[in-house]
Image (cartoon, rainbow, N blue to C red):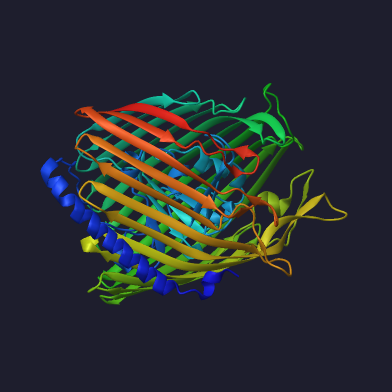
C-alpha cells in the first residue's frame, strides 16, 4: 500500500496553504508599484454567480456541495488557446487522458483510476457513453472541440445514484451554450506544424423570450507519421424559448464527423482508416412554479457510427462496421419547499440498438433500461449541509442494480473553510455484445451481472485573501468488484465475458488557483493515484494509470491588448506491465495573443515547446514540437 495512507497529510496541507498564502501576498505586494506606474488597463470582466449543477442535477451554491467537482474555466481555456476537450480535461485533478498517437486519435479518459467504460459522459442531459459504445465512444474525447459549450463540469467518485450506469469513477457533464442579447459572432482561422489547418465559427443572440446559438468547427492535420492524416468536423446548435413565464422549451443538436488514418503502433503496423461519426439531438420542456417546483422532461436521440477500412477502401476485418443508436427519455422534478430543503426525483428510460456488419454478415442486438432516483439536500443550519440519495435500475438483458449516496459539507464562515465527505456506490451494466456474445470470438453469458463499486472521499476547500487564493485537497478510495473481462473458455468460442475481476484505487487530489495580481493568474492541479488489480492473491499495479500527474498554467494580461502565458503538464510513474515501466514525461506549452484592432486578435502558441519525446500509450509516439498561429475576429 502507498505510504500516504498513514502520512501526515493534514499537517502537509496546512504547510502548503501557508506557503501559498505567503507567495500570493508577496507577489501582490511586489507588483503594486509596477501596476500603478504602468497603469496597464485590463479587460473588463462580468462576475457571474458561481454554481455547480452536476453534483445534484440542479444549480447549487458551491458552499453546500459535498462532492468533489471541477468546473472548467472555459474563458481562461480560450485565452490559453485550448480548443480540444482532451487537453481541457487534463487540466483537472483526478483525470487522466490517454491518446493513441497524434491529433484526432482515439482518447481514453480515466477518473480516479476507473476504466474508460466506468466514466460517464453526459451532454445536454443525455448519456453519451456506455459499455456498448465504449469502443466508439473513445472518439467523444479525442475528436471533440470545446467550442459551442457553455459549461463543462467534472464530478468525481461513484455517482450511480443520480446518473445510473457507468458513473463509477466519475461523470463529465457538458452543456451546449445558450444565446441571449444582440447578435454576436466569432470567426477563427489558423494553421501550423504538421500541415495543420483549422477554423471555428460561432454566432449567438436572442430576445427576452428566445435565444439561439450555432457553432461550426473544422480541423485537419497530417500529424508526423506517414499515413496518419486526420480530418474532423464539429457542429452544434441550441434554440430555446419561453412561450409563457412558467414554461421553457428548447432543442439542441450536436455532431462530430471524423476521418482518421491509423498507422498502428511502432512495433505492429496496422495501416487503415477509421470513419467515426456521432450525433446527438435533444428536445426539452421545463415547467416552473416560481422557485418552489421545477419539472423538466428531456427526450434524446444519440447515434454513433464506427467503420474500419483499409487504405484501398475495402473492409479490413470482420465486424468492421458498428452502429449504436439510443433513444432516451428523462423526467426530472425539483422541489424546494424552503431555503433549507431541496428534493430531486426522476425517472428515465433508455432503448438501445446495436448493429454490426462483417462476420456474420449482419447482427442486431437490443436492450431496454429503466431507472428511478430520489435525492435530497438539507441545510438545517447555515454551516452544515447533508445529501442523501437512492436509485434503482432495471436492465432487460442483465438484471437490476441499486445504488445509494451520502454526503456532508461543513463550512466555517470565519475562515472561509469547507470540510466535505461523501460515500456512494456505482455500477456499469454489461454491453450487449458482452451479454449476447459476438461471432466468431465471443460466446454469450446469460448470467453476466453489472460491475459494482463502492467509494468514499474526504476533502477540504479553503479560500484566502478575499477569494484571490483558493485551495482544494481530497483523499479518496474506491473498490470495484464483479468486473467484466473476456476469459478463455474451453468448449465455447475462444472467449466469454465473465464477472471475475476486482480492483482498488486510492489517492490524493490537489487543486489551487491564485490571482497573483490584477493581471496575473496561476492555476495548479495534481494527483497522486494508486490503482491495483486485486483479483489474484497479490495486488498488482494496473497498466497506464500514472501514480503522479499534474498540470499548471500561468496567464499574464500584460496590457488590455496583449496576453501571454505558459502551461506545464507532467505524468510520472507508469507501468506497461507488472514489471515494465514507461518513461515519465512533461510537456510545456507557450501561448500569446495580441488585439491589433478592436475585435481582431492574432494568436500564436507552441505545443511541446522543448520537443520532448514521449508516449501516452506504448508504441504510439505523441507529437513533437508544434507551432501554430491564427486570427480571431469578433463581430
Q: Which of 294 and 58 is in front in this view?
A: 58
Q: Specify the quadrant that holds the N terminus.
A: bottom right
Q: Which of 574 and 405 is in front in this view?
A: 574
- Decide if residue 125 is in sight here: no
Specify the farthest residue to the top: 312
Q: Nearer the viewer, residue 569 or 535?
A: 569
Apparent side of residue 486 relative to residue 59 in the rendered image (left or right): right
Apparent side of residue 365 relative to residue 377 in the rendered image (left or right): right
Q: In this view, does 377 lie above or below 52?
A: below
Number of marks drawn: 0
Apparent side of residue 146 relative to residue 518 in the rendered image (left or right): right
Q: In this view, does 52 lie above or below 137?
A: below
Question: At x 28% / y 49%, what residue is drawn?
Answer: 521
Residue 264 placement: quadrant = top right
Q: Where is residue 491 in the image (x, y as percent from the top left)?
A: 88, 54
Q: Specify the quadrant that holds the C terminus.
A: top left
Q: Where is residue 101 in the image (x, y as percent from the top left)?
A: 58, 37
Q: Where is residue 260 in the image (x, y as percent from the top left)?
A: 58, 30
Q: Nearer the viewer, residue 19 or 532?
A: 19
Q: Is residue 350 above or below residue 225?
A: below
Specify the farthest residue to the bottom: 381
Q: Position of residue 144 (x, y in %)?
A: 47, 38
Residue 500 placement: quadrant = bottom right
Specify the farthest residue to the right: 491
- Decide if residue 156 is in sight here: yes
Amino acid at each position: 500500500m502507498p505510504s500516504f495512507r498513514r502520512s501526515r497529510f493534514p499537517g502537509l496541507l496546512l504547510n502548503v496553504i501557508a506557503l501559498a498564502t505567503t507567495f500570493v501576498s508577496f507577489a501582490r505586494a511586489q507588483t503594486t508599484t509596477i501596476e500603478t506606474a504602468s497603469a496597464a488597463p485590463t479587460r473588463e470582466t462580468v462576475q457571474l454567480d458561481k454554481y455547480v449543477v452536476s453534483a445534484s442535477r440542479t444549480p447549487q451554491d458551491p458552499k453546500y456541495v459535498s462532492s468533489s467537482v471541477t468546473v472548467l474555466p472555459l474563458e481562461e481555456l480560450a485565452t490559453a488557446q485550448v480548443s480540444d476537450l482532451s487537453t481541457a480535461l487534463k487540466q483537472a485533478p483526478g483525470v487522466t487522458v490517454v491518446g493513441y498517437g497524434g491529433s484526432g486519435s482515439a482518447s481514453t479518459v480515466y477518473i480516479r483510476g476507473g476504466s474508460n467504460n466506468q466514466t460517464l459522459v453526459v451532454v445536454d442531459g443525455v448519456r453519451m457513453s456506455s459499455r456498448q459504445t465504449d469502443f466508439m465512444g473513445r472518439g467523444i474525447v479525442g475528436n471533440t472541440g470545446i467550442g459551442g459549450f457553455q459549461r463543462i463540469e467534472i464530478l468525481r467518485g461513484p455517482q450511480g445514484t443520480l446518473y445510473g450506469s457507468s458513473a463509477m469513477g466519475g461523470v463529465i457533464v457538458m452543456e451546449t451554450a445558450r444565446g441571449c442579447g444582440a447578435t454576436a459572432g466569432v470567426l477563427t482561422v489558423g494553421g501550423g506544424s504538421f500541415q495543420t489547418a483549422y477554423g471555428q465559427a460561432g454566432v449567438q443572440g436572442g430576445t427576452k423570450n428566445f435565444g439561439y446559438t450555432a457553432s461550426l468547427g473544422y480541423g485537419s492535420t497530417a500529424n508526423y507519421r506517414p499515413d496518419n492524416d486526420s480530418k474532423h468536423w464539429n457542429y452544434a446548435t441550441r434554440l430555446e424559448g419561453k412561450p409563457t413565464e412558467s414554461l421553457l422549451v428548447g432543442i439542441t443538436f450536436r455532431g462530430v464527423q471524423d476521418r482518421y488514418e491509423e498507422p498502428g503502433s511502432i512495433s505492429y503496423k496496422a495501416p487503415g482508416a477509421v470513419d467515426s461519426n456521432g450525433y446527438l439531438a435533444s428536445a426539452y420542456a421545463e415547467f416552473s412554479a416560481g422557485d418552489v417546483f421545477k419539472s423538466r422532461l428531456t427526450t434524446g436521440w444519440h447515434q454513433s457510427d464506427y467503420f474500419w477500412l483499409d487504405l484501398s477502401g475495402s473492409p479490413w476485418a470482420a465486424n468492421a462496421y458498428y452502429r449504436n443508436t439510443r433513444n432516451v427519455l428523462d423526467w426530472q422534478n425539483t422541489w424546494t419547499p424552503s431555503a433549507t430543503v431541496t428534493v430531486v426525483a426522476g425517472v428515465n428510460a433508455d432503448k438501445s440498438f446495436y448493429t454490426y456488419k462483417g462476420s456474420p454478415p449482419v447482427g442486431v442486438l437490443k436492450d431496454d433500461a429503466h431507472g428511478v432516483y430520489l435525492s435530497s439536500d438539507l441545510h438545517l443550519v447555515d454551516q452544515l449541509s447533508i445529501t442523501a440519495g437512492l436509485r434503482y435500475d432495471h436492465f432487460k438483458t442483465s438484471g437490476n442494480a441499486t445504488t445509494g449516496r451520502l454526503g456532508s459539507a461543513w463550512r466555517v464562515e470565519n475562515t472561509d473553510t469547507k470540510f466535505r465527505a461523501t460515500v456512494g456506490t456505482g455500477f456499469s451494466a454489461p454491453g450487449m455484445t458482452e451479454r449476447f456474445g459476438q461471432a466468431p470470438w465471443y460466446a454469450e453469458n446469460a448470467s453476466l451481472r453489472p460491475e459494482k463499486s463502492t467509494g468514499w472521499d474526504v476533502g477540504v476547500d479553503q479560500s484566502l485573501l478575499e477569494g484571490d487564493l483558493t485551495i482544494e485537497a481530497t483523499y479518496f478510495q474506491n473498490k470495484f468488484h464483479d468486473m467484466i473481462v473476456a476469459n478463455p473458455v474451453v468448449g465455447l468460442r475462444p472467449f466469454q465475458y465473465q464477472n471475475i475481476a476486482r480492483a482498488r484505487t486510492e489517492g490524493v487530489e490537489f487543486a489551487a488557483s491564485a490571482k497573483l495580481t490584477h493581471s496575473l493568474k496561476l492555476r495548479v492541479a495534481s494527483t497522486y493515484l494508486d490503482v491495483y488489480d486485486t483479483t489474484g492473491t497479490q495486488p498488482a499495479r494496473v497498466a497506464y494509470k500514472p501514480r503522479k500527474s499534474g498540470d499548471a498554467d500561468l496567464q499574464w494580461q500584460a496590457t488590455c491588448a496583449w496576453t501571454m502565458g505558459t502551461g506545464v503538464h507532467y505524468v510520472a510513474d507508469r507501468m506497461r506491465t507488472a514489471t515494465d515501466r514507461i518513461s515519465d514525461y512533461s510537456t510545456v506549452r507557450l501561448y500569446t495573443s495580441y488585439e491589433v484592432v478592436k475585435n481582431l486578435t492574432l494568436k500564436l502558441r507552441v505545443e511541446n515547446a522543448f520537443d520532448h519525446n514521449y508516449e501516452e500509450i506504448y508504441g504510439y509516439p505523441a507529437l513533437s514540437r508544434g507551432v501554430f498561429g491564427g486570427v480571431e475576429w469578433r463581430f
